[in-house]
Amino acid sequence: FLLPEGVVLTGSSSYRLYIKINEEQISRTFYDVPIEVRNLGSGLHAELSIDAGRVMLSGGRSAVNSLSARDVELFVDASGLAAGEHEVSVQCSYGELSDTLTALFWPGTLTLTITD
């Protein structure tokens, strides 16, 4: 094989070298992400103490840059909840990249008021 100019072979041993190259890791923050109420019982109405939040996604540059604001969702699950005030956890969804990205979001919890 040919050696690049300026490189000198000093011995006859050969070595196998493995180099792992990782994609650059970045973060991107989405602001004013609307918070949805999902699975609200029929005939019920919902009001949230906070109606929008923010999401910071971190991961490989290509995955993070492939997302748009409409791919990022914040929501609460009202399954089985009756009329009254409920402290509920906010959940985050960001499409098919859930396995490759890390999400930090605010708020973590909020008050959901359900009326009939």
Image (cartoon, rainbow, N blue to C red):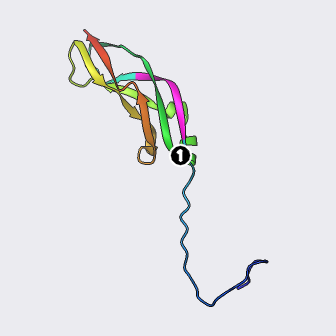
Circle 1: element type = helix
* Amino acid beneath label 1: Ala
How many discs mark residues in the rendered view? 1
Note whether residue 39 is visible. no
Q: On the image, numbered disc 1 is attached to which residue?
A: 63
Which quadrant holds the C terminus?
top left
Dominant SS type (magenta):
strand
Can you give x and y, in whole percent of width and height, for residue 89 in the image? 30, 26
Front in this rendered view, residue 30 or 78: 30
Residue 29 among those drawn in magenta = yes
On screen, residue 33 above or below 25: above
Can you give x and y, in whole percent of width and height, for residue 112 in the image? 30, 16
The quarter of the displayed image where residue 2 is located: bottom right
- Taking the image as shown, residue 114 lies to the left or right of residue 94, namely left
Can you give x and y, in whole percent of width and height, for residue 88 in the image? 28, 23
Residue 113 among those drawn in magenta = no
Q: Residue furthest right?
A: 5
The quarter of the displayed image where residue 85 is located: top left
Q: Which residue appears at 47% of the width and 31% of the height? A: 55
Q: Which residue appears at 22% of the width and 12% of the height? A: 83
Q: Which residue appears at 20% of the width and 16% of the height? A: 82
Q: Residue furthest front?
A: 10
- Taking the image as shown, residue 41 lies to the left or right of residue 51, namely left
The residue range painted magenta reads 27-35
Q: Which residue appears at 27% of the width and 12% of the height? A: 114
Note whether residue 88 is visible. yes
Front in this rendered view, residue 112 or 28: 28
For label 1, the crowd category at 10 Å Cα-Cα, with few meaning under 14, some 14 to 19 and many 20 or more, is some
Can you give x and y, in whole percent of width and height, for residue 41 in the image? 25, 19
Which quadrant holds the N terminus?
bottom right
